[in-house]
Amino acid sequence: MPTAITFKNFYKSHVLEKLFIHTERLIIRNLKPADVEDFHIYRSNPDVTKYQGFNVMDIEQCAAFIEKQKDKVFGTAGEWVQYAIENKVTKRLIGDCAIKLDILNIQIAETGITISHLEQGKGFAKEAMLAVMAFLFETKNVRRIAEITDAENVAAINLLKSMGFRQEGHFIENIFFKGKWGSEFLFAMLQREWNGKK
Ligand SMILES: CC(C)(COP(=O)(O)OP(=O)(O)OC[C@H]1O[C@@H](n2cnc3c(N)ncnc32)[C@H](O)[C@@H]1OP(=O)(O)O)[C@@H](O)C(=O)NCCC(=O)NCCS
């Protein structure tokens, strides 16, 4: 059966490796212990974590989080990996982005991104995400990338729309979140849609 052979070969050629992506202004790489102060600056800010699945962190929690993430490789099915976004000029951490490959099919990915409140509005999220999407669709042959966002998170919604994501779903009060019921949007893009935009 040709489909099964292709699928098997795809898995065979899928090598686990540390992710390293360059853009014009940014490097996307594994988090490292030296990132902890910059990481703490925005992960301790309630405005930054408002719509996210985690709460503010103290410096010890940040250090422990980085320790767990620092050696992770790209490509493990079902596992979220959080990557550093570094400014090439200042060499400081300006945010982080996360990628998870679906546990049942690694040609399906989910992503997320956070940019420090000190660095927002400079096009960094879009630059980082477009590079991550190019890596997933063009290098890793991912077929679909999805992202879920709080229905009130205007910045994230505009970011996703500006990159060409399609809104597929609106879940009404589907999540009990930070003390109240919240609604979420599901956005997605297919590999063929990405190719069509080039
Ligand atoms: C969402 C987030 C990552 C955007 O980061 P950013 O670096 O400021 O975004 P960019 O500067 O790359 O902007 C990308 C697009 O989104 C739009 N946008 C970004 N922030 C916006 C805001 N607060 N209000 C309206 N539009 C906004 C920009 O206008 C831009 O659109 P354009 O390309 O059409 O001009 C950032 O606000 C953030 O980290 N928020 C907190 C964490 C979070 O909620 N993450 C999303 C989880 S799903």
Image (cartoon, helix red, strand yellow):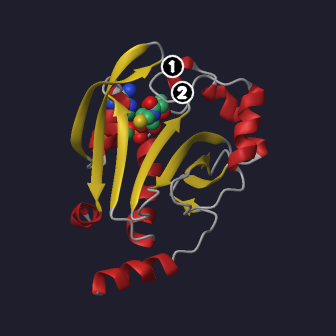
Residue highlighted by disc 1: 47
Question: Is 164 drawn above or below residue 1 in the view shown?
Answer: above
Q: Which mark is residue 172?
A: none
Residue highlighted by disc 2: 117
State yes or no: Cβ of the residue under disc 1 lies below 8 Å from any atom of ligand 1.
yes
Q: Position of residue 141 (x, y in %)?
A: 39, 71
- The amino acid at mark 2 is His
Question: Is 141 drawn above or below residue 40 in the view shown?
Answer: below
Which quadrant holds the C terminus? bottom left
Q: Secondary structure at mark 2?
A: loop
Of callouts 2 and 1, the N-terminal one = 1
Q: Position of residue 115 (x, y in %)?
A: 52, 36
**In the current view of this chain or complex, which residue is farthest to the top?**
179
Which is closer to the viewer, label 2 or label 1? 1
Q: Position of residue 40 (x, y in %)?
A: 69, 29
The local crowd at label 1, few if under 14, some if 14 to 19, many if 20 or more residues have their Cα within 10 Å, is few
Q: Residue at x 38, y 77 (%)?
A: 7
